[in-house]
């Protein structure tokens, strides 16, 4: 074949054209290869992603593809998804919401739902984060939906919220949430020209229940109290637990302070029904302090402090009642602080005194024992009875020091009477719950007996039945250990606590002391007569002697004598006396 020769310029043009074509083919091949690699990479990411992915047709809303993670998450196979709309999938139960969501997906390039509820094939409820983006693929608009399971995260967030704003025991709001609610309500109160009432509640004698029956019973009691308080308030009000046995209540939409008394009386009335917990019937009351916004203050901290002071005033007024705040309570609060400060120095300054009240055999009128009772000669407030300072001593941790002081003074005094030639009798000393639970109790008592040279058989230790029943096994060990060396034990205030008679029979005690509340109205109340008679019979069956406290009249004594009571203690024979006067009594 004859070759056609081209002119030089034409040949150059053809060569250039050929090179351009070759470059275009190579570029196309490179782009194609890159697309294949990109497609493979996308498919690999799609298949292995740790989030669920749905690909939707942006026009029809039909599902074009679904990745394995979403199928595993929801428990459906691929056939369940492909070619279906969202609202046809069981996981998206709310069809109307799904249709509305798709309508949004068609009009917006990006959508994010923070907490979308879905349901798995086995009925589990999960929370997901739903994010969608619109893409153009091969001239077709598609919607990629990324679905992330945030169920555990939401549970953790809820747990953190509960820990931050709610009391873990009662599930009531805590003080932080109470304060936030107060701020919101003050804005409404100002706008509507209304008032708010802040209530401070404290359970009466809760510590005694905790000490005697244990924290498990105490916690169950607090839960029951929380439920009763919730039942007493309106939906617009709020109950919070701020710690221990203390509760706050916010009463809203108050026109005049007097309205508060209606709600407070309802709360007090709810406590009349006893609480039954683990077989124990507990009669619990509460003392309530009230401060009014904005009358008493506009600041929550001030209102809380004022309500707290009012609550203490309610306790001092006899408990099971309520008091409104007034400025005079500030003076009482300062007196309380001063009293605590003085009490801490009272022993060193020798301001505490031991008084003695005899226990007398009813048949012979002879003194069998003498109870040592503490008094306080305050340098400025004068002579203070025990109820004025012993509860405070228990609260501020001084009760054990007072117990040990009384033990040492009373044992030394009893030994002094014996050394002076008087007929020997025992000295009876009350042990507080905290002192009885002291691990070194036996060691302390034996040290004092050795120090004072008092024979152990002339020491009688009194514990209340509540203290004994708090940990009966421990009580048996402690009482048995000390009675083994000759120390005697009595159960004080019998009839007011929560005794189990089967356990009482196992305690090696010598006496039961009938609480004076049963003796006080014995002449007028047949029920009290029946109770006293039953206690005497019970004690005698257990081979125990019985002491009646608070005997003040001959008629009371006559009934006790006819009922077989062994001993009495009270003003009928003698009030509590200082040692000098008691010495005269026994001469």
Image (cartoon, rainbow, N blue to C red):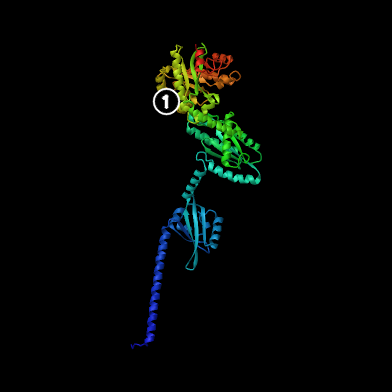
Res. 271 in view? no
Res. 20 in view? yes
Vertical arrangement, residue 315 with respect to residue 241, above or below: above
* Percent x, y of residue 455: 41, 17
Task: Name the residue that disc number 1 marks.
Answer: 441
User: Which residue shows up at 53% across the image and 61% down it?
Assistant: 105
Asked whether, in this view, residue 445 is left or right of residue 393, the answer is: left
Q: Look at the numbered disc 1 and give the secondary structure of its residue.
A: helix
Badge 1 crowding class, 10 Å Cα cut-off, few under 14, some 14 to 19, many 20 or more, is some
Q: Nearer the viewer, residue 424 or 280?
A: 424
- In the rendered image, which quarter is residue 189 located in? top right
Report the label total. 1
Asked whether, in this view, residue 366 is left or right of residue 6, the answer is: right
Asked whether, in this view, residue 187 is left or right of residue 208, the answer is: right
Q: Give the quarter of the figure containing the N terminus.
A: bottom left
Q: Nearer the viewer, residue 483 or 40?
A: 483
Vertical arrangement, residue 446 with respect to residue 278, above or below: above
* Percent x, y of residue 460: 46, 19
- In the rendered image, which quarter is residue 18 located in? bottom left
* Percent x, y of residue 548: 53, 18
Vertical arrangement, residue 37 with respect to residue 492, above or below: below
Q: Nearer the viewer, residue 21 or 203?
A: 203
* Percent x, y of residue 90: 51, 54
């Amino acid at each position: 074949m004859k070759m056609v020769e081209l002119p030089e310029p034409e040949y150059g043009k053809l060569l250039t054209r050929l090179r351009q074509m070759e470059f275009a083919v190579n570029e196309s091949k490179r782009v194609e290869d890159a697309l294949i690699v990109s497609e493979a990479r996308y498919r690999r990411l799609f298949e292995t992603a740790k989030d669920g992915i749905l690909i939707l047709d942006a026009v029809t809303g039909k599902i074009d593809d679904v990745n394995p993670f979403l199928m595993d998450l929801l428990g459906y196979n691929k056939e369940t998804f492909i070619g279906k709309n969202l609202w046809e999938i069981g996981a998206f139960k709310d069809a109307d919401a799904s249709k509305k969501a798709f309508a949004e997906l068609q009009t917006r390039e990006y959508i994010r739902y923070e907490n979308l509820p879905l349901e798995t094939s086995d009925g589990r409820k999960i929370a997901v984060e739903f994010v969608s983006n619109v893409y153009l693929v091969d001239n077709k608009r598609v919607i990629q939906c990324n679905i992330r399971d945030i169920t555990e995260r939401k549970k953790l967030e809820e747990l953190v919220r509960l820990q931050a704003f709610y009391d873990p025991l009662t599930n009531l709001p805590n003080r932080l949430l109470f304060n936030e609610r107060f701020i919101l309500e003050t804005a409404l109160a100002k706008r509507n020209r209304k008032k708010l009432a802040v209530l401070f509640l404290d359970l009466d004698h809760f510590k005694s229940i905790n000490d005697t029956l244990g924290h498990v019973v105490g916690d169950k009691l607090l839960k029951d109290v929380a439920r009763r308080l919730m039942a007493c308030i309106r939906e617009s009000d709020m109950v919070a637990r701020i710690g221990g046995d203390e509760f706050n209540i916010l009463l809203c939409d108050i026109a005049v302070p007097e309205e508060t008394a209606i709600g407070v009386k309802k709360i007090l009335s709810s406590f009349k029904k006893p609480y039954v917990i683990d077989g124990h019937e507990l009669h619990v009351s509460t003392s309530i302090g009230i401060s009014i916004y904005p009358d008493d203050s506009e600041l929550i901290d001030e209102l809380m402090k004022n309500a707290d002071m009012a609550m203490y005033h309610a306790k001092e007024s006899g408990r099971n009642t309520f008091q409104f705040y007034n400025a005079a309570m500030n003076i009482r609060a300062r007196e309380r602080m001063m009293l605590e400060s003085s009490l801490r120095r009272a022993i060193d300054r020798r301001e505490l005194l031991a008084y003695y009240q005899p226990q007398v055999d009813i048949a012979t009128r002879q003194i069998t024992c003498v109870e040592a009772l503490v008094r306080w000669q305050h340098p400025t407030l004068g002579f203070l009875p025990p109820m004025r300072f012993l509860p405070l001593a228990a609260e501020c941790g001084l009760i054990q020091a007072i117990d040990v002081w009384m033990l040492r003074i009373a044992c030394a005094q009893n030994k002094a009477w014996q050394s002076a030639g008087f007929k020997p009798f025992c000295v009876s000393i009350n042990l507080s719950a905290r002192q009885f639970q002291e691990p070194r109790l036996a060691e302390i008592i034996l040290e004092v007996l050795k120090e004072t040279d008092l024979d152990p058989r002339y020491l009688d230790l009194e514990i209340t039945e509540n203290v004994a029943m708090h940990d009966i096994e421990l009580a048996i060990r402690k009482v048995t250990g000390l009675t083994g060396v000759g120390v005697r034990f009595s159960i004080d205030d019998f009839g007011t606590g929560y005794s189990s008679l089967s356990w009482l029979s196992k305690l090696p005690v010598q006496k039961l002391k009938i609480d004076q509340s049963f003796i006080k109205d014995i002449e007028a109340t047949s029920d009290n007569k029946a109770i006293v008679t039953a206690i005497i019979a019970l004690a005698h069956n257990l081979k125990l002697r019985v002491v009646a406290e608070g005997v003040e009249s001959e008629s009371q004594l006559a009934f006790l004598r006819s009922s077989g009571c062994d001993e009495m203690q009270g003003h009928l024979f003698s009030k509590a006396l200082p040692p000098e006067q008691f010495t005269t009594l026994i001469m």
